[in-house]
Image: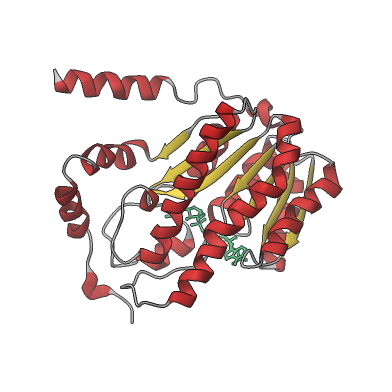
Amino acid sequence: ILVLFVGLILAFCFYSGNEDFKPEMLKGKRVIVTGASTGIGEQMAYHLARMGSHILITARTEAKLQKVVAQCLELGAASASYISGSMEDMAFAQSVVRKAEELWGSLDMLILNHVSPSNFSYFNGDIAHMQKVLNINFLSYVTMTVAALPMLKDSGGSIIVVSSFAGKVAFPLTAYYSATKFALDGFFSSLRQEFVMQNSNVSITLCVLGLIDTETAMKAVSGVVQSSAAPKEECALEIIKGGALRQREIYYEYLSTKIPLLIRDWAPNLLDYIIQMHYNVEKLKD
Ligand code: NDP
């Protein structure tokens, strides 16, 4: 009976997936993508470009942003612009939204994806670093959301929050990162409920990602975590689909992220043990 029950739940989850997604849903939409100079954010920008969106991308490295913008225009973006700066600075986070307002006077989708670089290492008690990572990975997400809400309410738009499996299940060697990703879940899941209670037409999609083959992630886990990585191009598309369909959460890859959550609340020690088995701490960099 239990197997049948779990099977039914999984079938339902798969059924309520991305069946109705059509790339035309993004045509002409005005979208901000943060952390789009590399990795998953860069791939999201390319998908949106092919779908004919207006795109505003941001990150710190101007030269990389210029290349991504040029590529987006080649791929068919309705328009593509960038603004460079660091999300450690909340004034900059606000200025990204202001730039969208200047460009378009409106906004349909806010994709919050940037992340502070982090290594796999034991927690070393560096509170200044914790503060910095919180600013970049969490507070700037909240700041941009607050700044963008008036435009998103007008358009009935969407907020897409790129989180991690490490924001649902705690992993060793990622204390700084994991703390910020759990914070995103707490904040945005609370906000989503408030939107429903206030009849707000803005959707929030939390994206729970497993290991993805971006350059940064591959470098960080190299040798330490024994786990296969999923392709960033497909991951980027799944995030956009989830946002366009206004899903509450997306899990990518589904089974490797969703199944451990079933164990998490019922047998946490077992899950900890399984996680630790995948770590090779002898390979940790100094
Ligand atoms: P990347 O490291 O490839 O890209 C991170 C982006 O954030 C870059 O564009 C980077 O550009 C930008 N960025 C970094 N620091 C700052 C800063 N201070 N201010 C503004 N922008 C900054 O990351 P991924 O593509 O791997 O990850 C994207 C998202 O997916 C993240 O939220 C991550 O947590 C999540 N995720 C990724 C997983 C993976 O395995 N790859 C697994 C689970 C979740 P620049 O350096 O030019 O500023």
Residue 220 figure quarter: bottom left
Residue 226 placement, left or right of 53: left
Horizontal and vertical percent for residue 166? 36, 53
Colouring: secondary structure
Is residue 272 placed above or below 129 in the rendered structure? Answer: above
Horizontal and vertical percent for residue 234? 49, 41
Instruction: Residue at 23%, 71% (x, y): give it.
Output: 281
Horizontal and vertical percent for residue 285? 33, 78
**Which quadrant, please, contains the C terminus?**
bottom left
Q: Nearer the viewer, residue 257 or 212?
A: 257
Evaluate whether residue 153 shows in this view.
yes
Residue 252 figure quarter: top left
Instruction: Residue at 71%, 63% (x, y): give it.
Output: 92
**Which quadrant, please, contains the N terminus?**
top left
The residue positioned farthest toward the bottom in the image shown = 286
Horizontal and vertical percent for residue 199? 62, 25
Instruction: Residue at 38%, 24% (x, y): give it.
Output: 14
